[in-house]
Amino acid sequence: MSGSPARPQPIDLGAAAADMLELLEKLASFSDPGPGVTRLLYSPEWAGAQRFLLERMAESGLDSFADGVGNVYGRLSGSRSSERVVLTGSHIDTVVNGGKYDGAYGVAASVTALQHLYRAYGPPLRTLVAVSFAEEEGSRFPLTFWGSGHLTGLYDGREAAGCRDEAGVTLQEAMADCQLGPRRPAPRCGDIAAYVELHVEQGIVLERSETQIGIVSAIAGQRRFAVTVEGTANHAGTTPMGLRRDALAAAADLTLRLEALAAEAGDPLVATVGRLDVRPNTPNVIPGEVRFTLDIRHSREAELEAFCAAVDAAFAAIAKRRDVAVRLEPRLTAAPAHMDARLQAELASVCDRRGLRWRSMVSGAGHDAQLFAPRCPAAMVFVPSASGISHAPEEYTSPADLASGLDVLLALLYKLGYECEEGTDDPGDGQRLT
Ligand code: HGY
Ligand code: MN
Ligand code: MN
């Protein structure tokens, strides 16, 4: 990389925001046809986006590479290379027919931020790394956080062989097919001094309260399950109602009971059946088997645990009454995660200095940051989602709000990368659990 400019000059936020928006639009073009953006792990669209990011990061003066599972990094090496690095980014995958901002905004902003920090101030003291995580949503394979889970030890890679998508392709086969060039090892989790993620809120709190920035205090914990209901497939015309073991009627019963239990538990608990497969899915056959997904969240671990126990008992009672078999297989256990207090305070001060209206808030959505929070100081910044819509083609955030988020990210990364005192390796509140 060429020498740093003679004299630092302040970053031109307008120019940086324009670069970020252009990158965001380009990323949105890597999508399956159809409404919104669909970019599933290891699909051709996914590989196109990651390859594009590798090139764009290199053009921006970053040392870009992919790791073994397809996370893509852009490294801006610091003069104090011995110290741990600051990692910033989000995920590049999407839900099916999702929006163009969920994940991609944090990726585009982190790449743009490092590019403009380097252009204005030259190399940092502490190394800054932008990351595009391979997968967070769990939209193609029945696991989630595959990208950040690779860095934080949630996965050891053996899961890839046994994990299949709806077409029966294993994660291992899909991963082998995507050509991302030579791979380098991911940053070790122990080498990460802080993780910072910029993301759209995906809810309506900021818009309703006319607030520009959300400073995340905690991220809700999640439990996800694959539920299988086994009844008896039979003739729809000759089987009396009293002699049926109808798996779909049972699944409907289970879903409504789940909804009633969640209503009794009250906010912030949420429980969702998002995917349902009926077999044999034929008009004149009583369904013999139904598979559906459970997604349960709460910001407090004890309540999450208690609710899952109540669901277990309720499902067993329905199974007995209906003489069907009901099996719950855990698919994800993500604990509620607290963001670093010192980084939150720094973000508040950045917003106050800029006159940005901000509020502290809990995230009901899951994020890569929740895997880092127990291991290093983690911070999340939200910008408003129009009408609170996300995971849908209508997902939208105004350019002005996107730019405000970038402004805050730039300020925090400048603080962590360029103003860190010698030897003070931990920028956090020192409250790490592990
Ligand atoms: O589901 C979530 O909370 C996130 O958008 N993956
Ligand atoms: Mn996301
Ligand atoms: Mn999402």
Image: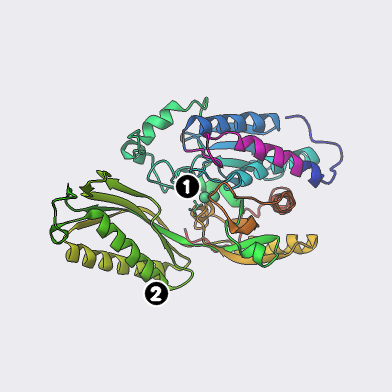
**Disc nearest the viewer among 1 and 2:** 2
Q: Specify the segment rendered in magenta.
A: 17-40
**Side of 344 relative to 186 (left or right):** right
Q: Assign the N terminus to one quadrant of the image.
A: top right
The residue that label 1 is drawn on is 137
Residue plotted at (19% across, 63% down): 322
Nearer to us in this view, 126 or 248: 248
Q: Position of residue 20 (x, y in %)?
A: 70, 41
Q: Secondary structure at mark 2?
A: helix
Residue plotted at (64% across, 32% down): 63
The numbered mark, 1 or 2, whose residue comes first in the sequence reads 1
Specify the label residue 266 is tagged with.
none
Residue plotted at (32% across, 35% down): 168
Q: Are marks 1 and 2 in contact (CB under 8 Å)?
A: no
Ligand 1 has an atom within 8 Å of the beta carbon of the residue at disc 1: yes
**Side of 426 relative to 353 (left or right):** left
Circle 2: residue type: Glu
Nearer to us in this view, 225 or 97: 97
Specify the label residue 264 is tagged with.
2
